[in-house]
Amino acid sequence: MQLEVIGVGGAGCRIADAIRAAEPAANSFLTDVFVFDTDAATLQRTVVPESHRHQYGQGTGIDADDDLERRFEIGETHADELLETLDRESGGEADARLVAVGLGGATGGGTAPALVAALQRRYDAPVYVLATLPADREFDPDADAGDTGPHAGTTSRTASGEPPRPDAAANAAATLERLEGLASALIAFDNETWLRPGETVSDAHDRCNRELAGRVAAVFAGGGAESDGPVAQNVIDASDVERILGNESAIVALGYGDQDVETSSSRFGLGLVSAERDVETSEAVSAVETVVRKGTHGKLTLECDPETAARGLLVVGGPPAWLNRQAIAEGRRALQSTVGGNGVLGGDAPRPDGETVFAAVVLAGIESDRIEELRAADRAP
Ligand SMILES: Nc1nc2c(ncn2[C@@H]2O[C@H](COP(=O)(O)OP(=O)(O)OP(=O)(O)O)[C@@H](O)[C@H]2O)c(=O)[nH]1
Ligand SMILES: [Mg+2]
C-alpha cells in the first residue's frame, strides 16, 4: 500500500526520518515523508528534503513555557497551513496517512489533534497516529532504576542534557483524550519498556526509532513488490490494513520476530551464483513458526495481553523459498486462536534479497494498563 508519513515535533520528525530509512529498496510503500516542527533545529537534523520540511508558529507568540492547552490552540491556528504544505508538495495519492508524534511534549502532542482532524475532513483515506508514550523517568524523579549513583532519585539528569518533563504524563493523557474519535487508529510505542535502565530518551532514541520504523515498514510495505519482483501469494493491501486497524481510534501494538537464514547470496557472496538454495521444508516450517511465536508473544511496542485484541494481522516475509505456505496459514490460525474472534488476516511478503525470515504482528483494539497508568499519574496530586 502507499502511505504518507507526517512527523510533528521532535520525536515525530526523528521517527518519520527512521521510517524513511527503513523503506525496503525493492518494496517502496511511502508516497511522501513530511516533517513539521516549531523548532528549526529539529528540522535541520532530519534527512527529509527541504521541500518536505516546514517550520511553523513563528510570530504566533509560542513560548517554551506554554502549557498544552495553549499549544492545542496554536495547533488549531496552524492546521490549515500544514495542510497546504502537504497539498503543495505531495507527490502521489496515498491510501492512508500516518501522523507520528511523541506524547509528553507540547509541540507534537499540541498539534496532532488539530492536524488529524483537518486531514480527516480533507481526505477519505484513513489517518493513523503513531505515538510514543513517555517513560516514567521523564516525569517521576524516583522512577529510573538504573541510576544508583550519588544523584539517584534527583533531577540531576538535566546535567546529561535531558531536562525533566514534569507534565509528560498529563500531556500524554490530554492528547490521547483529544485524539479519541479523531484518529482512525492509534499505534503506540511505550518508551518506558524500551529504555534500558539508566538511559535517557536521547541516549536511546536512535535504537528505539529503528525498532519502531522496522515494524512499521514490515506492516505497511507488506507484500507489495516492484512489477518485476515476485508477487506475494497472499497480498495484504490497504483495505486489509484498514479492516484490521479500524476507524474507531483503536489502540494498536506491533510485534516483530525475525531469524537469519542462509541464502544463496549469503553463501556465495554477491549473489553471483544465482541458483536458489533448496530449502528443507522442515527448516522453513520451523523458521516461520519461530518468528510468528516471537512476533505474537515477544516484546510488543506497547505491552498488553494479546488476548484482549479485537483484531489481528500477520505478515510473514523473507526470501521466497523460505515462505512455507502451510506454516504461514498455521501461524495465522495460531494468531486467530490467541486473539479470539474472526478478525485475523494473514499475508506474505517475499523479499528476494532478504537474509531473514520475519513476522510482523498487528494487535488492534487492545486494552492497555500502561495508558490507564498514565491517566492515573495525571490525576495524582
Ligand atoms: N521513541 C522516541 N521517543 C521520543 C523521541 N524524542 C522524544 N521522545 C518522546 O516524546 C516526548 C515528546 O518529546 P518531543 O517530541 O521532543 O517534544 P515536542 O513534540 O517537540 O514538544 P516540545 O516540548 O515543544 O519540544 C518525550 O517526552 C519522549 O517521551 C524519539 O526520538 N523517539
Ligand atoms: Mg520539540
Image: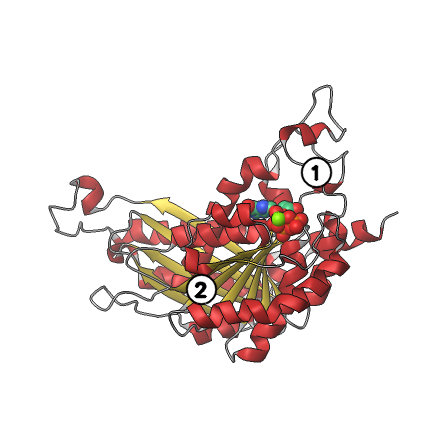
- Residue that extends furthest to the front in the rendered view of this protein: 59
Quarter assignment of residue 239: bottom left
Quarter assignment of residue 285: bottom left
- Placement of 240 over or under 205, stated as above or below: below
Residue on which the image places disc 1:
137
The one of 173 and 202 positioned closer to us in this rendering:
202
Where is residue 13 drawn, in percent x and y? 52, 52
Label whose residue precedes the other's in the sequence (2 or 1): 1
Distance from label 2 to label 1 (Cα)?
38 Å
Question: The disc labelled 1 sits on which kind of residue?
Answer: Arg
The one of 133 and 37 positioned closer to us in this rendering:
37
Q: Is mark 1 within 8 Å of ligand 1?
A: no
- Residue that extends furthest to the right in the rendered view of this protein: 381
Residue on which the image places disc 2:
332
Report the side of 69 relative to 243 (left or right). Answer: right
Q: Secondary structure at mark 1?
A: helix
Question: The disc labelled 2 sits on which kind of residue?
Answer: Arg
Question: Comparing marks 2 and 1, which lies closer to the viewer?
Answer: 1
Where is residue 238 drawn, in percent x and y? 43, 73
The one of 68 and 126 positioned closer to us in this rendering:
68
Q: Secondary structure at mark 2?
A: helix
Residue at figure coordinates x 23%, y 64% from the top left: 230
Check the picture and name the quadrant holding the N terminus. Answer: bottom left
Where is residue 31 drawn, in percent x and y? 39, 66
Q: Is residue 367 visible?
A: no
Residue at figure coordinates x 61%, y 69% from the top left: 79
Where is residue 241 drawn, in percent x and y? 47, 70
Q: Residues within 10 Å of mark 1 (few under 14, many from 20)?
A: many
